[in-house]
Amino acid sequence: MLDIQLLRTNIDAVAESLAKRGFVLDRETFHDLESRRKALQTRTQELQANRNSLSKQIGLLKAKSQDASSVMAQVSALKGELEANEIRLAELLREFDGFLAVIPNLPQDSVPVGRSDAENVEIKRWGNPRRFAFAVRDHVDLGETLGQLDFTTAAKIAGTRFSLMKGSLARLHRALAQFMLDTHTVEHGYTEVYAPYLVNAASLCGTGQLPKFEDDLFKILRSEAEPLYLIPTAEVPVTNIVRDEILAAEVLPLKLVCHTPCFRSEAGSYGRDTRGMIRQHQFDKVELVQIVAAEKSSAAHEELTGHAERILERLELPYRRVALSTGDLGFSSAKTYDLEVWLPAQKAYREISSCSNFESFQARRMQARYRSGRNKIELVHTLNGSGLAVGRTLVAVMENFQNADGSVDIPPVLRPYFGGLETIGRH
RNA sequence: GGAGACGUGGCCGAGAGGUCGAAGGCACUCCCCUGCUAAGGGAGCAUGCGGGCAUAAACCUGCAUCAAGGGUUCGAAUCCCUUCGUCUCCGCCA
């Protein structure tokens, strides 16, 4: 949610900024809503004030056992207009909220301007893709040859876009998550969090997945009760820890890390990445979340991205960092870096982490604030990033550490999680 | 799943149809007093959204908010309904 004051006072600058990301701000509708709101709200509040003061008089008269019937008649005269106004105002505010809720965040000035991912800008590269003396296989080939990755059975159990791992591959998957959690907690100062995998609509509105992207979510309907949704990312439960809170300045920054499965319906992605584990309905992710004071968020964004990069470096996986262009930016984000890992079978860098600074956009929706000074309350800034997507990291390890015989070496840094085992082979 | 009790500011807690955005306490901020280490006195201290205001702070003022939503009423923290949550007992369960 953008600051409505900014829209009121500076709508042309807002529209210009949004245009960079391909969003056309409907200024006429805004002005129309705003002028109707102002008139209606002022009038309604005036009527309410009248009613309140007259009602107070009634109370005072009755306390003195005096006749209040003429004042009561006055209030009754107000009633019709007041109720009609209250209803119209509520409708108008709902409409206004709906209008505001689908406006994306403003990109930071440093975000490269572009229409799509084609105009993303590479910031850095790390590591050199390995040269293979044999024909590389992709992770599907490798996993099925090992007898430890099975999409057919997963489809039988659940459906398409699920995976089933067994044996050392399942253990590798677990080891990766453990390693990421250990690194972020011990070396990067994050607090480990275990959070619900089902969340309510208010939480999803807080982080921006609702109301606009309901189709991407798995929804659990319960009779009578409010629906719950499977989390698309740990960002949702973890960031919402601070929803409707006023934090003491001393507790900031909050640095939280959380390993969860993530569930995405992948509506609208039919036909894309249908092979293998790249795009699944269920995948694990280790998520980094930071809640920081407003002026600290840009530095925190660089730091957090570095924390995610550190995982790739310690796993010895070549990657690059890309600044998303305005056209590729997520709805809530003011600036995003994607980390892309080298996949030898695709001969391409593929997204494995997305690190975003949301500034006050989520905080405003969540009413997540902190005391920034004496009697001064400010919205926090929120950030998050994958550190990393576990399934995709598994894919990258398999493909980059494969041997000619189809076995997969275990990256040295993961071997402590394997009791000394160095290679995953058929068994 | 069944039965009952409950949900009030940063925290504890009073409040039972009108002068209640809400006593009192704790915490916090400022001032005074006091030569010391959780002494005393005074003042301030919820949030959101409007209007004054074309702009920032300050200030004044209005409305809303006592878990959430709806209802009764001239008037609701207070009465009624629904939902959510907490606690206690029973049942079930890893």
Image (spheres, coloured by chain):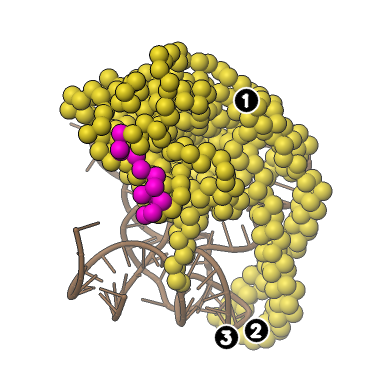
Chain colours: A yellow, B brown
**Disc 1 marks which residue?**
A120
Q: Which secondary structure lies at badge 2?
A: loop
Circles 3, 2 touching at the beta carbon (< 8 Å): no
Quadrant of the snapshot with the N terminus of chain A: top right
Circles 1, 3 touching at the beta carbon (< 8 Å): no
The amino acid on which the numbered mark 3 sits, given as a three-letter code, is Ser
Compared across the picture, whether A235 is left or right of A99 comes to left
Does residue A150 show up magenta in the picture? yes
Vertical position of residue A266 compared to residue B1: above or below? above
Quadrant of the snapshot with the C terminus of chain A: top left
Q: Earlier in the sequence, mark 2 or mark 1?
A: 2
**Disc 2 marks which residue?**
A68
Residue B74: name its quadrant.
bottom right
Residue A65 image label:
3
Q: Earlier in the sequence, mark 1 or mark 3?
A: 3
State the residue at coordinates (60%, 28%). Answer: A324
Q: Which secondary structure lies at badge 1?
A: loop
State the residue at coordinates (76%, 54%). Answer: A33
The amino acid on which the numbered mark 1 sits, given as a three-letter code, is Asn
Do we see residue A115 in this rendering?
yes
Q: Position of residue A93 (x, y in %)?
A: 68, 59
Q: Which residues are magenta?
A: A146-157
CA gap, disc 2 and disc 1: 72 Å
**What is the chain identity of the residue bearing mark 1?**
A
